[in-house]
Amino acid sequence: MPQQERQLQTFFSLFYFSINSGSLISTFLTPILRQDVKCFDQDSCYPLAFGVPAILMVVSIVVFIIGKNSYVIKKPQGNVVLEVSKCIGHAVAQKWRSKGVSRDHWLEHADDTYPRRLIEDIKSTLGVLFLFLPLPIFWALFDQQVFSHDPL
């Protein structure tokens, strides 16, 4: 709701801070719990190292469920993937049909049927997806490395 814009920003800022600070603390705390604490007559304590984060995750789920009555739950409407696919298909078809018409971006050929906001959102999404194109190549090359622990 527009009147809750400030509370929403505060909530998500605190949420983001909590997630990242919890990750930072667990990065340091988990190895200490595993190595320095003795349990079950062993030199290390894996149950405690993994049990503490598991218990905290259960607590977070319980808090989430308790607050569920305070949430505004909207029913999903439409299919975004289908709508985006139809918009892209329409833009390609329109661009192919109108070869003489020049536009700033090929997706703008769909502005006769689809809202401007959807077209701008698709442009942004395609821009981000373009950045991820090298990732499969990187991981394919990375996975070809041979990791050997045998001394020569």
Image (cartoon, grey):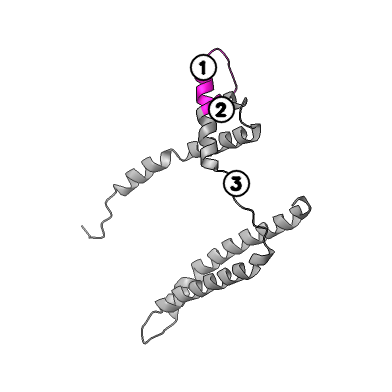
Residue 114: name its quadrant: top right
Residue at 42% from the left image edge and 39% from the top image edge: 134
Farthest left residue in view: 152
Farthest right residue in view: 3
Residue 105 included in the magenta stretch of the image: yes
Provide the residue designation for mark 2.
Answer: 107
Provide the residue designation for mark 3.
Answer: 77
Q: Label 1 vs label 2: CA separation?
A: 13 Å
Q: Name the N-terminal-most of marks 2 and 3.
A: 3
Disc 3, SS? loop
Question: From which residue to which does the magenta span run?
Answer: 90-107
Disc 1, SS? helix
Residue at 57% from the left image edge and 33% from the top image edge: 123
Q: Which mark is residue 114?
A: none
In this rendering, the label closer to the viewer, 2 or 3: 3
Residue 148 relative to residue 30: left or right: left
Q: Label 2 vs label 3: CA separation?
A: 24 Å
Q: Categorize mark 3 by other alpha carbons within 10 Å: few (<14), some (14-19), many (20+).
A: few
Provide the residue designation for mark 1.
Answer: 97
Disc 2, SS? helix
**Which sits in the foreground, 48 or 69?**
69
Q: Report if the CB atoms under discs 2 and 3 are less than 8 Å apart.
A: no
Q: Name the N-terminal-most of marks 3 and 1.
A: 3
Q: Is residue 122 above or below residue 16?
A: above
Q: Categorize mark 2 by other alpha carbons within 10 Å: few (<14), some (14-19), many (20+).
A: many
| Quarter of the picture holding the C terminus | bottom left
Q: Report if the CB atoms under discs 1 and 2 are less than 8 Å apart.
A: no
- The amino acid marked with disc number 2 is Leu
